[in-house]
Amino acid sequence: MPFLGQDWRSPGQNWVKTGDGWKRFLNEQSNFVSDINSYCNVDNKENLFNNLKCDIAAKKRKKDCLNNNTKTQNQHQEIWIYVHKGSTKERHGYCTLGEAFNRLDFSSAIMDSRRFNYIVRLLELIAKSQLTSLSGIAQKNYMNILEKVVQKVLNDQQNIRLIKELLQTLYMSLCTLVQCMGKSVLVGNINFWVHRMEKIVNWQQQLNNIQITRPPVKGTTLTDLPLSLQLNIMQRLADGRDIVCLGQVSSDLQVLSEDRLLWKRLCQYHFTERQIRKRAIVSDKGLLEWKKMYFKLVRCYPRREQYGDTLQLCRHCHILSWKDTKHPCTANNPESFQVSLSPQDFINMFRF
């Protein structure tokens, strides 16, 4: 029958087991050691205290070493991650959006021009709807990556409008979430998030104050090319706002930016025939106003997304990685199982 009464050894006291039974040791700050005589011999009290100090110092060094190793492991970024949505005999739990955001190396990906737009779009989608689903460390990692993105844009003076839109989206989302802090929708103190919002406003001011320095002219410029080549370059632009800005450079580019065939191809690239017919705009001469139709369609429908490099999901081993990254796949032809994921597809993978 088990003993159900209160233990006769009072809590907070140190006891040692001897041949005659348990004996209480009066010093409450001491720890158990293998030598029993050190507890009972009063003459060795000074040596005992020295040994205790050495034990405490050793434990502190061991704890610091463990913390350093943990920090080093957290800083290591993997280039692929296994995505699992349920528990099996081999694995327990499931992969979350925050875990994937922490473990995949997005910090290095933003330095690659092929992946930069992909990461920015992913950050924007998370800011719109998925910020509250991230853990505390994932939210911190999100802000760190965003800071690196802003610093890259400030240094390179490229993709300024893209980052301005991202910061504006994030700021509006945080304004809404901070007002709902009573519902515990964000991890951390509200003052900490207010400080982050102030940092976002500071980034917006830095982007607005950018003075783009024109590099010295060396060789042939865009305006020196034949008009056919200039129009061909314009047709490679996927954003109508870039075409409008390019048309403000010179009078010749202004004429090319109003080309009807240019805007027709742009509308057909981003939108379906049904969407175009539904939002058709006809001029007084009976011609379709493709330029006006494009900006009207942009307000109604999402544009077609195109990226130089995307995340890939292997349907055979359920591993998520970048396109040119080799993952430990057991299939004979791993390339045949690769599926490209858009930023929205990446987020949809972690919705349960």
Image: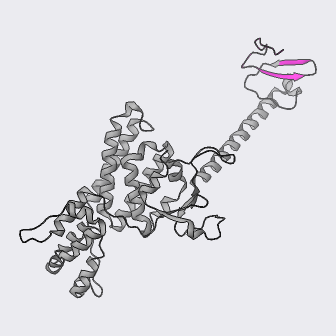
Q: Which residues are magenta?
A: 1-23
Q: Main secondary structure of the magenta part?
A: loop
> Whole-percent x and y of residue 91?
66, 47
Residue in the foreground of this view, choosing between 205 and 339: 339
How many numbered callouts? 0
107 left or right of 258 in image: right
Q: Quadrant of the N terminus?
A: top right
> Whole-percent x and y of residue 255?
14, 78
Q: Is residue 86 visible?
A: yes
> Whole-percent x and y of residue 264?
22, 72
Residue in the foreground of this view, choosing between 275 and 338: 275
Residue in the foreground of this view, choosing between 53 and 16: 16
* Up-down relation of residue 106 to residue 249 (above or below): above
226 left or right of 317 in image: left
Is 311 covered by the magenta stretch?
A: no
> Whole-percent x and y of residue 38?
86, 27
Is 8 covered by the magenta stretch?
A: yes
| Picture quadrant of residue 240 | bottom left
| Picture quadrant of residue 123 | bottom left
**In this view, which residue lies farthest toward the left?**
284
Identify the residue shown where x is 69% and y is 46%: 89
7 left or right of 200 in image: right
User: What colour-coding does the image apply?
Assistant: one colour
Q: Is residue 76 visible?
A: no
**In this view, which residue lies farthest toward the top?**
5
**In this view, which residue lies farthest toward the right?**
19
Residue in the foreground of this view, choosing between 246 and 147: 246
* Up-down relation of residue 184 to residue 245 (above or below): above
